[in-house]
Image (tube, rainbow, N blue to C red):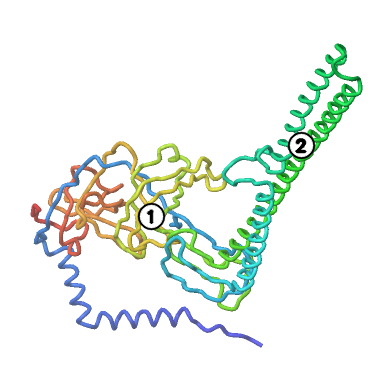
Amino acid sequence: MIVRRFPWALVLASLAICALAIACGQPGNLENKAKQSSVRGTDSRPIPVEVAMAEVREVPIHIDATGSFVAEESSEVAPLGSGRVVETPVDVGAFVNRGDIIVRLDDSDARLRVQQAKASAQQTEAAVRQAQSKIGLNPLTSFDPTTVPEVQASRANYESAVAEVKLAEADAQRYANLVQTGDVSQSNYEKARTQAVTATARADAARRQYEAAMNAARQNYQGVESAQASMDAALAQLAIAEKALEDTVIRAPIRGYVSARSVSVGEHVSPSSKIATILRADPIKLQLQVPEADAGRVSVGRPVSSRVAAHGTRVFTGHVSALNPAVDASSRAMTIEAKLNNPGLALRPGMFATARILLAGAEKAVLVPRTAVVADPSTDSAHAFVIEAGKARVRVVRIGEPENGLLRILSGISGGEEVAASRLDQLYDGASVQRERR
């Protein structure tokens, strides 16, 4: 079986010839070609344009960087105890001051524990007062066992017994002298001597009673200290119970906005549960990545200006607040932090930003009017027209950031050259121009 190939090349060539013949036969196309020829070649009338000089000025040295905004402070709020959520006074987006209530937990059990602890504290306090009164202890004075009534009585008894001993011994001595002179009988002397020995025994007994009373007073004081320790423990338990009751009310630890609230009424939470997230975003921090080569040029306090897509050309200003002491080994970049004022929360954590860090010193730059440059967003390029010998010559330029109302030219135009600043849409390479100074 023989397969014949269709002559596609011959058909395509025939179609192209027909299309060209039709196009040439239309008078409108011929007229357009004539007009284009007239504009580019035959029309020699100069185009009046405003001309400006490319100026060379000293501008501040800066570093351009990118990064993201983060909250100046962020707090993940969690409860200190467990319980069931009974109230959520705030919602996402609400502004709270420090101490404002975020969530309330069921406090019925905590209140009962507080009442129990209060009763125990009152009971131990009564025991302390009883022990103090037993030894006559004044809460305003320090303990002195000699002031205890029992001790004072036993001491008085002992002192009386000592006085009787002295009197009895004196009588016995006097009778002893009289016996020698024969003025008294031996029996009277023996009687006086026996009274002296008896008085001495009573004095020894009174001394032992006095010492026992002192020891008892000291032991009773130890009982006061023990009762005081029990009262302190009861008061500590009361404080713990009151703290547990206070912890059923979860408050904002910082002043800021609620960015998340993770619980609802009826849920059971524990210390491991995240209740809410609070952000403080005024001022706000901007974390920037600076190349390793520029790391040594940045210092704390240097001015920073930033832009975000959400606010177009609006510029937010601040200063460098912190430098990371290490350079990331993978990206070879150093992270720096800048702090910017953020009234009205125009800047939000997580926004991507471009920033300029102003360095010390200045450098020379070529500046032209904004109207002298045409940007082409589709190709991400820009061009301008330089005036040379009355002709417009197109130049592809690389532009930088605006400087005081002028546009900085990084390459393509040198200082002192004249550039067209108007009617750029009418110009083309080689077009004749008529200068009109701005």
The residue at which mark 2 appears reads as 210
Sequence-first tag of 1 and 2: 2
Q: Quadrant of residue 130?
A: bottom right
Q: Position of residue 208 (x, y in %)?
A: 81, 35
In the image, is 410 to the left or to the right of 427? right
Q: Label for residue 24?
A: none
The residue at which mark 1 appears reads as 283
When the figure is inspected, residue 131 is found, relative to residue 189, above or below; the finding is: below
Helix or strand or loop: what does disc 1 sit on? loop
Q: Residues within 10 Å of mark 1 (few under 14, many from 20)?
A: some
Tell us which disc is closer to us: 1 or 2: 2
In the image, is 128 to the left or to the right of 11? right
Q: CA distance from mark 1 to mark 2?
A: 77 Å
For the N terminus, the image quarter is bottom right
Amino acid tagged 1: Pro
Q: Residues within 10 Å of mark 2 (few under 14, many from 20)?
A: many
Amino acid tagged 2: Tyr
